[in-house]
Image: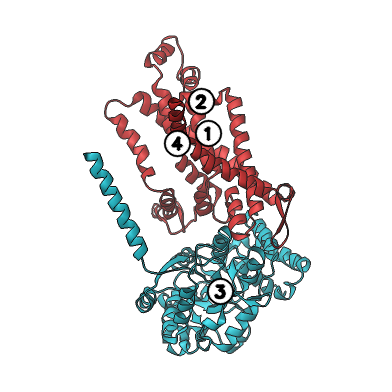
C-alpha cells in the first residue's frame, strides 16, 4: 500500500515537472562580463519580450574555452572582445555569421560599427557587433605614487612592492608600446613578434620584484588599491573611475605611450538555440535609454548612438579628466589577433610567472 | 543465471562509474596529448607536446618544484599530525577523544576556498598577523606574509592535516598499551619506544596518510593560486593555463599525463622505501 502511494506520488511529481518544463518561458543564455547586465535592464527586457535571460559572467579566455569545449553550444549570445573573434573562429569555428538585416543598425555609432565589422570579418562574413568599449591604462594612487605616468613606471622604485598587473596579453602589448616598439605592426610576422615578446618578457621578469601580485579578478585588485597595499596598477579605466568615486586621489591615467582601446562585442555561438532572442537582446541593448543604464552599471561607454548624451555626468567628467584630446588620439585600438600569436604570448607569460 | 545477473547488476554502478568517469576521459586525454597542431583545425599525431615539455625549462622546473614542495608538505604534515594522532589514539580518555577528533574535523566543514581566504585575511599586509606584530612592537611597519612559498606550504599543510590524522589515529588505536609499557619495562627510552614500537606499528597509517596528502597536494589548484601569488607557480596552474587561456588542449593533456605519471612514480618510490605493499596499506588503513 505504502509503496504504491509512493509510486503514484513520484509519477505525479514527474508529470508536474514535465508540464512546468514545457511551460517554461523562452530563454536567452547570455555569456557576458560582470556589470554588463544590470537587473533593471534584464527585467525590462523580460517584461517587454517574455524572454528570460540566464546570465553567465566570464572573461575573454573563458568565453572562448567554454564555447570551444562544446563547439559553440550552451549559450545563445556571447560578448568577446572584437580582437579575439576571428582567431578563435578560424581555429575552432565557435560562432555563426550574423544576419545584419535583423538588426537596427541605426542604433549604433556608425564609425564604431564599421570598424568592428571590419575587424570581425572572416571569409566575407561578419561575426561581431560593438557593444561596450573602454581602455586599459593605469590606476594610480596619485598621492602615494605621483610619478607614475607610463607602464614602465610600474617597475620604478616609487612603487616597489606596491605595483600590480595582469599576467595576460594586454600587459605584453602595453609594455611593448612603452618600450618604444609597435606590436600591432608586428602582428603579421610571427618571428619578429616573437623576438619583440622575448624583450618584453625579459623586462617583465626584471620588473616582477616590484609587483605585489598578478591580479586576476577585478575585485582583488580594487581591494588592494583601497587598502593601500597596491598604489599603482595596470587596469581598466572603469575600475579606476569606480575607486575615484570613493577615494579622489585614486585616478585613472591614460599612459604616455597610449591607453589600449578595447571593444566588447555581441557574437552568436555556432550552436546557439535562440538567435531571435539574441537579436532582440542586441537591439534592445542598443536603444539609447537602455544603453545609458548599462553604461552606468559597467562604468564604460557603449556603441549606442546617443547614449553618451544620457550618460551620468560623473562618468563624463571622469572620462574628460583621464582623457584630454591628445590622449584620446593616442589610444591604441587592438587589431584582430591572428591565430598562433597567443601561443607565443602564452609561453612568454609562463616564463614570466615561473621566474623568481 | 539469476545469480550472474544479480552480480552483474551489483557491479554495474562501480563499473560504469570507473569506466565513464575515470577510464574514458583518460583515454581521450591520452589521445589528445599526442595530437599536434599543423594549421587551423588541422591536427596530426605526434610527440610534440611531450618534447615541448622536455625542451622548455620553464615547464619541467615548475614540475620539479611542484614535486619537491609536495614531498616537503607531506613530510611536514606527517611530523605535525603524528603527535596529534598519538594523543587522540593513546592518551585522550573518555569524552575528550571524540571531542578532539571533532575539533580536527570542524575546519573541513568549510570549503577549501573559504579556508584559504581565511589565511589570506590573517597573512596579508593589512591583515591580522601584521597588525598584531606591530602592536607588540616586533615589527616597525606592515609586513607582507602572503605570496611566498612559506605561505603556500602553510596553506597546503593545513589543508592536508585531517587526511593524515585520520589514518594515523586508526593505525595507532590498534596498538596495545601493554606493548608500550613492556617496552619501557625492558628499559627502553622514549625515543627507543617510539622508534622500535610505535612507528613500526603506525607504518601502514603513515604510508596511507602520506599517499593521500601527497596526491591532494600535488593536484591542488586553489591554494597555490591564492597564497603563492606571483612566485607560486604550481604545475596544475600550467595545466589550467594551457587549457583555458592558451586554448592548447593537446599541450594541457600532455601536462596532465606528466602529472599523473609523477604522482604514480613518487607513490611507488615511497612504498618501496618504506617496504610497504600497496594492497597491504589499503587493507590495514
Between disc 2 and disc 3, the foreground one is 2
Establish whether labels 3 and 4 are both on one chain: no
- Label 3 packing within 10 angstroms: few (<14), some (14-19), many (20+): many
**Image coords of residue B275 (percent x, y):** 58, 22
The residue tagged 2 is B281
Chain letter of disc 3 in the image: A
**Image coords of residue A19 (percent x, y):** 33, 60
Distance of label 3 from label 1 (alpha carbons):
47 Å
Question: Could you say which disc has been placed on residue A138 in the image?
Answer: 3
Give the chain ID for the red colour. Answer: B
Closer to the chain start, of discs 4 and 2, is: 4
Chain letter of disc 1 in the image: B
Establish whether labels 1 and 4 are both on one chain: yes
Residue B148 visible in the displayed image: yes
Question: Could you say which disc has been placed on residue A253 in the image?
Answer: none
The residue tagged 1 is B211
Residue B259, compared with residue A244, is above or below; it is above
Contact check, label 1 and label 4, Cβ < 8 Å: no
Closer to the chain start, of discs 1 and 2, is: 1
The residue tagged 4 is B163
Q: Residue at x 52, y 48 (%)?
A: B152
Amino acid at each position: 500500500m505504502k509503496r504504491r502511494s509512493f509510486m503514484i506520488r513520484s509519477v505525479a511529481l514527474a508529470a508536474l515537472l514535465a508540464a512546468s518544463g514545457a511551460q517554461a518561458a523562452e530563454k536567452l543564455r547570455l555569456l557576458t562580463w560582470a556589470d554588463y547586465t544590470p537587473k533593471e535592464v534584464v527585467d525590462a527586457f523580460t517584461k517587454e519580450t517574455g524572454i528570460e535571460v540566464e546570465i553567465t559572467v566570464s572573461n575573454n579566455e573563458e568565453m572562448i574555452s567554454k564555447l570551444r569545449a562544446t563547439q559553440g553550444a550552451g549559450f545563445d549570445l556571447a560578448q568577446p572582445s572584437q580582437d579575439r573573434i576571428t582567431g578563435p573562429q578560424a581555429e575552432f569555428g565557435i560562432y555563426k555569421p550574423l544576419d545584419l538585416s535583423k538588426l537596427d543598425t541605426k542604433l549604433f555609432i556608425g564609425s564604431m560599427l564599421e570598424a568592428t565589422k571590419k575587424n570581425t570579418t572572416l571569409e566575407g562574413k561578419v561575426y561581431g557587433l560593438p557593444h561596450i568599449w573602454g581602455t586599459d591604462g593605469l590606476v594610480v594612487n596619485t598621492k602615494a605614487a605621483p610619478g607614475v605616468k607610463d607602464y614602465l613606471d610600474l617597475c620604478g622604485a616609487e612603487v616597489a612592492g606596491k605595483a600590480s598587473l595582469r599576467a595576460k596579453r594586454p600587459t605584453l602589448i602595453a609594455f611593448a608600446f612603452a618600450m618604444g616598439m609597435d606590436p600591432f605592426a608586428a602582428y603579421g610576422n610571427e618571428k619578429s613578434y616573437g623576438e619583440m615578446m622575448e624583450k618584453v618578457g625579459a623586462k617583465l621578469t626584471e620588473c616582477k620584484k616590484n609587483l605585489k601580485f598578478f591580479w586576476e579578478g577585478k575585485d582583488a585588485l580594487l581591494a588592494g588599491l583601497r587598502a593601500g597595499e597596491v598604489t599603482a596598477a595596470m587596469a581598466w579605466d572603469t575600475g579606476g573611475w569606480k575607486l575615484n568615486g570613493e577615494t579622489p586621489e585614486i585616478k585613472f591615467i591614460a599612459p604616455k605611450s597610449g591607453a589600449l582601446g578595447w571593444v566588447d562585442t555581441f557574437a552568436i555561438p555556432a550552436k546557439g538555440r535562440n538567435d531571435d532572442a539574441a537579436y532582440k537582446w542586441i537591439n534592445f541593448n542598443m536603444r539609447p535609454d537602455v544603453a545609458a543604464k548599462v553604461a552606468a552599471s559597467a562604468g564604460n561607454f557603449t556603441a549606442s548612438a546617443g547614449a553618451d548624451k544620457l550618460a551620468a555626468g560623473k562618468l563624463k567628467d571622469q572620462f574628460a579628466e583621464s582623457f584630454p584630446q591628445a590622449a584620446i588620439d593616442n589610444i591604441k585600438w587592438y587589431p584582430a589577433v591572428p591565430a598562433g600569436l597567443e601561443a607565443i604570448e602564452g609561453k612568454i607569460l609562463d616564463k614570466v610567472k615561473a621566474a623568481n | 543465471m539469476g545469480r550472474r545477473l544479480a552480480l552483474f547488476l551489483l557491479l554495474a554502478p562501480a563499473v560504469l562509474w570507473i569506466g565513464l568517469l575515470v577510464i574514458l576521459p583518460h583515454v581521450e586525454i591520452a589521445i589528445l596529448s599526442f595530437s599536434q597542431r599543423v594549421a587551423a583545425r588541422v591536427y596530426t599525431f605526434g610527440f610534440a607536446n611531450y618534447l615541448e615539455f622536455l625542451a622548455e625549462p620553464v615547464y619541467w622546473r615548475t614540475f620539479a618544484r611542484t614535486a619537491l614542495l609536495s614531498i616537503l608538505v607531506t613530510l611536514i604534515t606527517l611530523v605535525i599530525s603524528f603527535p596529534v594522532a598519538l594523543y587522540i589514539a593513546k592518551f585522550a580518555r573518555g569524552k575528550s577523544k571524540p571531542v578532539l577528533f571533532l575539533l580536527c574535523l570542524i575546519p573541513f566543514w568549510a570549503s577549501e576556498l573559504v579556508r584559504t581566504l581565511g589565511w589570506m585575511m590573517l597573512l596579508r599586509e593589512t591583515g591580522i598577523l601584521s597588525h598584531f606584530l606591530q602592536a607588540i612592537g616586533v615589527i616597525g611597519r606592515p609586513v607582507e606574509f602572503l605570496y611566498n612559498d612559506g605561505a603556500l606550504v602553510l596553506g597546503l599543510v593545513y589543508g592536508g592535516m585531517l587526511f593524515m590524522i585520520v589514518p594515523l589515529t586508526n593505525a595507532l588505536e590498534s596498538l596495545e598499551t601493554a606493548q608500550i609499557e613492556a617496552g619501557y619495562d625492558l628499559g627502553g627510552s622514549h625515543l627507543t619506544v617510539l622508534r622500535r614500537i610505535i612507528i613500526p606499528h603506525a607504518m601502514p597509517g603513515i604510508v596511507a596518510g602520506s599517499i593521500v596528502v601527497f596526491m591532494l597536494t600535488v593536484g591542488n589548484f586553489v591554494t597555490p593560486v591564492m597564497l603563492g601569488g606571483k612566485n607560486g607557480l604550481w604545475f596544475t596552474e600550467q595545466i589550467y593555463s594551457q587549457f583555458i587561456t592558451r586554448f592548447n588542449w593537446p599541450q594541457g593533456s600532455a601536462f596532465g599525463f606528466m602529472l599523473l605519471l609523477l604522482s604514480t612514480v613518487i607513490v611507488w618510490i615511497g612504498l618501496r622505501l618504506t617496504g610497504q605493499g600497496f594492497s597491504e596499506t589499503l587493507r590495514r588503513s
